[in-house]
């Protein structure tokens, strides 16, 4: 078993981004909108702001009250769409219930949609003509490339069918030449399907759901989940202890996929900037 060190891969990616930024005639700009005062969201936004500073980006952190109206939020996004200093716009999710998340995402200009969630960018990914790709799946592909995996012809199982991770992850693997099965809460015989997989990507949000005995010997296991137990310990969606001696490669939680998501967000913002220069 070998650990896929997401922290180190993300650090290398950030260093590469910084060296490219140093050669541009202006700094790429990222605006992050935080609605309300959810503590976890505030931590994510702070991490993104710090990452921007590290690589030399121009960064705007925009705090809005939890009771902001739909129109006020959309107006802020439209302002940023026309701001030449801003190459990427990110609205931190989840949003308060009275706001329409889909409408918010669709209001962001596709050229500045560095989360890769706009239907235009998802459509391009579906057609294997990707532009701005969802950060977590793209980060997973970078990790697989870094450890030298040849994905062509591999049997891959993605557990979780969200628009943020599961569905675009399946498309990334399909575009890379894999045979892909998407599993979800209604899937019959999940252990049987996992036992056939060369590469397993799990993003379900259920602590330690996937057991080692379900995993094929020598499979690569990518754990996107991050869950806090009552004890305060952070764990993934995969039972690490029972899986680590069966998998050939496995991502830890924390320190696996998480750091890659933010590094890939920076990568997308740099790509958006380069398109305009």
Image: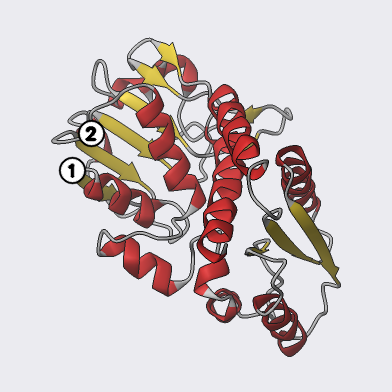
Q: Secondary structure at mark 2?
A: loop
Judge by depth and name the residue closer to the eye, 31 or 38: 31
Residue 177 — which label?
A: 1
Judge by depth and name the residue closer to the eye, 166 or 189: 166
Q: Secondary structure at mark 1?
A: loop
- Check the image and report above or below for 205 versus 69: above
> x%, y% of residue 29?
70, 59
Residue at 82% x, 66% y: name it.
62
Residue 204 visible (yes or no): no
Rendered image quadrant of residue 35:
bottom right
Mark 1 and mark 2 in contact? Answer it, CB < 8 Å: yes
Give the residue number, with chain letter if any, for mark 2. 151
Residue at 69% x, 81% y: name it.
98
Outermost residue on the bottom side: it is 71
> x%, y% of residue 193?
20, 37
- Around disc 1, counting alpha carbons within 10 Å, would you say few (fewer than 14), some (14 to 19), or many (20 or more)? some
> x%, y% of residue 138?
43, 45
Residue 200 — which label?
A: none
Judge by depth and name the residue closer to the eye, 169 or 200: 169
Outermost residue on the left side: it is 153
Residue 268 visible (yes or no): yes
- Check the image and report above or below for 151 versus 251: below
Among the two numbered marks 1 and 2 on one chain, the one whose residue lies closer to the N terminus: 2
Residue at 37% x, 18% y: name it.
249
Q: CA distance from mark 1 to mark 2?
A: 6 Å
């Amino acid at each position: 078993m070998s650990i896929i060190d997401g922290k180190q891969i993300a650090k290398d990616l950030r260093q590469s981004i910084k060296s490219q930024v140093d050669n541009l005639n202006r700094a790429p700009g990222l605006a992050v909108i935080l609605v309300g005062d959810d503590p976890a969201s505030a931590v994510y936004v702070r991490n993104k702001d710090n990452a921007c500073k590290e690589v030399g980006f121009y960064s705007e952190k925009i705090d809005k009250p939890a009771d902001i109206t739909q129109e006020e939020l959309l107006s802020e996004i439209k302002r940023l769409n026309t701001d030449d200093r801003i190459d990427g716009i990110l609205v931190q999710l989840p949003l308060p219930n009275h706001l329409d998340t889909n409408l918010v995402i669709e209001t962001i200009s596709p050229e500045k949609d560095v989360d890769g969630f706009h239907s235009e960018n998802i459509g391009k990914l579906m057609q294997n003509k990707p532009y701005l790709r969802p950060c977590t799946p793209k980060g997973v592909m970078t990790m697989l490339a870094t450890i030298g995996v040849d994905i062509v012809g591999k049997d891959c199982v993605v557990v979780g069918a969200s628009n943020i991770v599961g569905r675009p992850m399946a498309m990334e693997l399909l575009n890379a030449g894999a045979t892909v099965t998407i599993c979800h809460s209604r899937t019959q015989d999940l252990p049987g399907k996992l036992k056939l997989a060369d590469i397993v990507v799990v993003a379900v949000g259920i602590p330690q759901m996937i057991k080692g005995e379900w995993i094929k010997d020598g499979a690569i296991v990518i754990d996107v989940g991050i869950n806090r137990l009552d004890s305060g310990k952070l764990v993934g969606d995969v039972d690490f202890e029972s899986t680590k001696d069966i998998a050939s490669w496995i991502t830890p939680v924390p320190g696996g996929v998480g750091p890659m998501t933010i590094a890939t967000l920076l990568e997308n913002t740099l790509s958006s900037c380069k398109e305009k220069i």
